[in-house]
Image: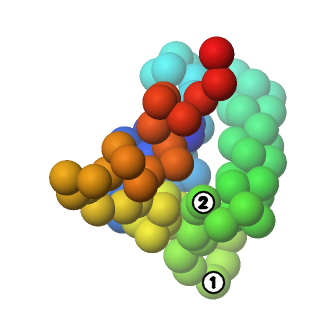
């Protein structure tokens, strides 16, 4: 689910889109769909609390979830020297 949201920063996703992605398009029984929905909701809650995902909308039935584009940074010629997210900064 994180890879879906992060791949399209700024795009709004409904809960159903995220549940379909997590279930890999399989048809789920009602109890399985509810369990998947609750799992997605828990992950979204953690991502919203950490500031990585923004919830757009006021009610739970009509809201969207968006990967925050403020987490992205511009790339310039000094990106690898200044960026803290590159593999070069990882310890062996």
> How many neighbours does mark 1 have within 10 angstroms: few (below 14), some (14-19), or many (20 or more)?
few
Front residue of 85/58: it is: 85
Q: Residue furthest left?
A: 77
Q: Residue furthest bottom?
A: 58
70 is higher (above) or lower (below) than 82: below
21 is higher (above) or lower (below) than 83: above
Render colour scheme? rainbow
- Left/right placement of residue 31 relative to residue 11 reads right
Front residue of 58/49: it is: 49
> How many neighbours does mark 2 have within 10 angstroms: few (below 14), some (14-19), or many (20 or more)?
some
Point 52% across, 48% down: residue: 84
- Left/right placement of residue 91 relative to residue 20 reads right
- Residue 28 x, y percent position in the rendering: 63, 22
Point 59% across, 29% down: residue: 90
- Residue 40 x, y percent position in the rendering: 70, 42
Point 66% across, 78% down: residue: 59
Front residue of 39/91: it is: 91
Identify the image quadrant of the C terminus: top right
Residue annotated with mark 1: 58
**Number of marks present in the image shown:** 2
Residue 41 seen by the camera: no
Identify the image quadrant of the N terminus: top right
Helix, strand, or loop for circle 1? loop
Residue annotated with mark 2: 52
73 is higher (above) or lower (below) than 60: above
First along the sequence among labels 2 and 1:
2
Helix, strand, or loop for circle 2? loop
- Residue 60 x, y percent position in the rendering: 68, 70
- Residue 46 x, y percent position in the rendering: 77, 54
Front residue of 5/22: it is: 5
């Amino acid at each position: 689910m994180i890879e879906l949201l992060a791949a399209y920063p700024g795009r709004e996703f409904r809960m159903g889109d995220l549940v379909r992605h997590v279930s890999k398009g399989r048809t789920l029984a009602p109890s399985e769909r509810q369990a998947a929905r609750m799992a997605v909701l828990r992950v979204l809650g953690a991502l919203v609390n950490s500031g990585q995902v923004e919830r757009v909308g006021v009610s739970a039935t009509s809201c969207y979830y968006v990967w925050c584009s403020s987490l992205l940074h511009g790339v310039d010629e000094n990106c690898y020297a200044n960026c803290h997210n590159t593999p070069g900064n990882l310890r062996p």
